[in-house]
Image (cartoon, rainbow, N blue to C red):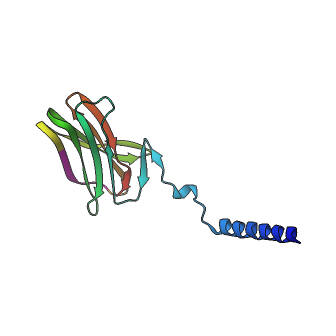
Amino acid sequence: MKKSKILSLIMTMIMVCTLFISTQGVAKASDVPECVDGSYLTNEDSSEVTVGSMSRGVYLKSGSSTITKAGPGKIAAGGNTVGQKVISKITVDVTVERYVNGKWGYYTSWIETNYNSVYVGTSKTLSVPTGYYYRVCCVHYANSDVSDSYTDGIYI
């Protein structure tokens, strides 16, 4: 008698678990953003990434890349570089890329440099053609240390 109650309880638990699992949404491949060259193609309003100090870096502390929707057909793009201390030359090299025909391609770029500083940052609002994904890639220089960062792609 005890054995049949335990078996009945186990069977009931299995049915409840099966029912619970079958009613849960299963992620479809189309729900997962596509990743191209390290950047996901998203429908987010912005993307920002920060990289930390290099393992052997003496001068570079961190760097960031950022992209934000700034209105119809506009993006705000930029980046910054932070030094470990005041250094003689600190630079951020910003490149905006556009996703066309299955790959990232150059759209525009600029460089900002500060001397005898611990920080450099730059941002621009750009008018861009709509119907594309855009991302920002930055190269961060602090004297002889170099690192890079890049955002996910956002759809404009």
Task: Give yes or no for residue 123 being in the magenta stretch.
Answer: yes
Q: Which residues are magenta?
A: 121-129
Q: Is residue 141 above or below residue 134?
A: above
Place of residue 52 in the rendered image (x, y in percent of width and height, measured from the top left): 31, 40
x 34%, y 60%: residue = 45
Q: Residue furthest right?
A: 1
Task: Give yes or no for residue 152 being in the magenta stretch.
Answer: no
Asked whether residue 132 appears in the rendered view, the answer is no
Does 19 sit left or right of 44 as displayed? Answer: right
x 22%, y 41%: residue = 81
Q: Quadrant of residue 150?
A: top left
Does 128 sit left or right of 114 as displayed? Answer: right
Which sits in the foreground, 155 or 120? 120
Q: Is residue 15 above or below residue 113?
A: below
Place of residue 131 in the rendered image (x, y in percent of width and height, measured from the top left): 37, 57
Q: Residue furthest front?
A: 2
x 58%, y 58%: residue = 28
Asked whether residue 117 appears in the rendered view, the answer is yes
